[in-house]
Amino acid sequence: MDTALNIVVVEDHDALREVTVEALCNMNHNAVGVDCAEALVDEIGAFPIDLLVVDLNLPGEDGISLARRLRSVQPDVGIIMMTARSQISEKLSGYENGADLYLTKPISVEELGAAVGALARRIKRREQDRPGFVLNRSGLFLQGSQGGVGLSAHEAAMLSALARAPGRRLESWQLIELSGKADADLSKSTLEVQIVRLRKKLMQAGAVDQPIKAVRGQGYQLCIEVTVA
């Protein structure tokens, strides 16, 4: 079983973040680093996350709050907290707020590798057992075989409507109505751009070929099964 993961390291100490990312890449994982919780937003849409490695003492939103928030919208994500906080009450708080593992600094590369490897086996096993694509409407998140992808509110609404439509097909005017646009000609060109973006996100999550195809003179059809949760 391929246990390579897409990993984001959230650590504000530049040198430690770079060393951690390099170590994870050397373990054949796909890893990137950001220096704060706010910067993670840019990665969620473009980089499907399997595992978050997060420091607790971050500028702005702290690691506990970030883990709790991400866990609420992506229940299957792996979360490793790395911190100098070693009190039992702090460890319990970490686990209560979404941590799979709570590691106390300093952490060796070997220990981190073993922790990530153990979680990787669990995460990949869960991916094999769950449905192909699941749309979390409230969390604006699509989970697929290649990981999770963040969606805009309008993208989630379009995907939900297509998934629930007879034959998973809707006419252009029906999709345009979801955006509330009044100018039909302008809206059709805008709709094409929106469909292209949504199609790319479906492919990031694991769809192949054309997950949404245009139906000439009518509208669009969703060509994969998506469960709306």
Image (cartoon, rainbow, N blue to C red):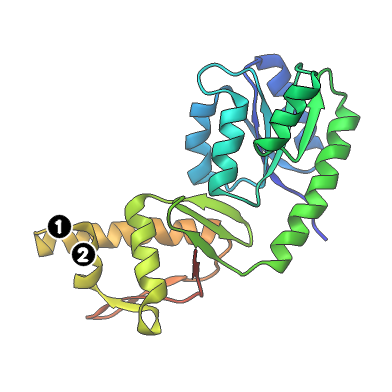
Q: Is residue 152 left or right of residue 23?
A: left
Q: Secondary structure at mark 1?
A: loop
Residue 215: horizontal and vertical position, in percent?
A: 31, 80
On the image, which quarter does residue 88 sit in? Answer: top right
On the image, which quarter does residue 69 sit in? Answer: top right
As rendered, which of 68 and 21 lies closer to the eye?
A: 68
Residue 141: horizontal and vertical position, in percent?
A: 49, 53
Residue at 22% from the left image edge and 80% from the top image edge:
217
As rendered, which of 74 and 121 lies closer to the eye?
A: 74
Residue 187: horizontal and vertical position, in percent?
A: 17, 60
Amino acid identity at mark 2: Ile
Please say if the residues under marks 2 and 1 sit with CB atoms less than 8 Å apart.
Answer: yes
| Residue beneath disc 1 | 181
Amino acid identity at mark 1: Lys
| Residue beneath disc 2 | 176
Q: Secondary structure at mark 2?
A: helix
